Amino acid sequence: MFNPVQTSATVKLWKSGDVTINVAGREFDGKLFAIKLYVFNTRIPDESVLFSEGGVKVYQGGENTTLNPPSIRVYRSNKNIYISIDNLTTQQQEISGNGLAFINIAVLNRIYNFKNVSITINVNDSIFESYWIDSLKKAGFIVTGNTANLNNVNLTLEIKNYYINLY
């Protein structure tokens, strides 16, 4: 009563990047996204928690810490490559206040299989791009900047379409 703590928050869904995969002349796009919770408090520095691609980052006082690395899904076994990308299918959204917020998430997977193809991947991820680059290199891709290439492989490509609404 004499020294109240005022807190408000904002939940924001936004496009944090994209992944484009070209397989034998056919292009597949994924819109990467993040859900970020901003907490504004009169007693501590503003804090935000970000969730993207299975990863969690915390931002406070000009610093950021990765609490959980992203789940970049690029695997290789001999000539077989598996890649899974996230794709935001809804619009960017934001809600704020000092009450309750609800997040409704639905996912629909599409899987494509290709035999003996060449793959080019272009990654633009404002949050976890270095994790993508490391995963692609570990899978044997030749990486230049944010573009990776691999030839004569069998590809299983999973695209996870996310339908997200904030209330």
Image (spheres, rainbow, N blue to C red):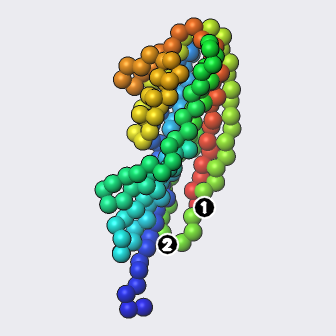
**Tag 1 secondary structure:** loop
Check the picture and name the quadrant holding the C terminus.
Answer: bottom right
Q: Is residue 157 visible?
A: yes
Residue 129 lies, in percent from the top left, at 42, 34
Q: Residue furthest bottom?
A: 2
**Tag 2 secondary structure:** loop
Instruction: Identify the amino acid type marked 1.
Output: Phe
Position of 65 with respect to 98 (left or right) is left
- Mark 1 Cα-neighbour bin, 10 Å: few <14, some 14–19, many ≥20: few
For image coordinates 36% across by 59% down, the residue present is: 60
* Numbered label attached to residue 98: 2
Check the picture and name the quadrant holding the N terminus.
Answer: bottom left
Dividing the picture into quadrants, the one containing residue 72 is: top right
- Mark 2 Cα-neighbour bin, 10 Å: few <14, some 14–19, many ≥20: few
Q: Which residue is mark 1?
A: 102
Residue 36 lies, in percent from the top left, at 47, 54
Instruction: Identify the amino acid type marked 2.
Output: Asn
For image coordinates 53% across by 9% down, the residue present is: 151
Total labels drawn: 2
Residue 65 lies, in percent from the top left, at 41, 51
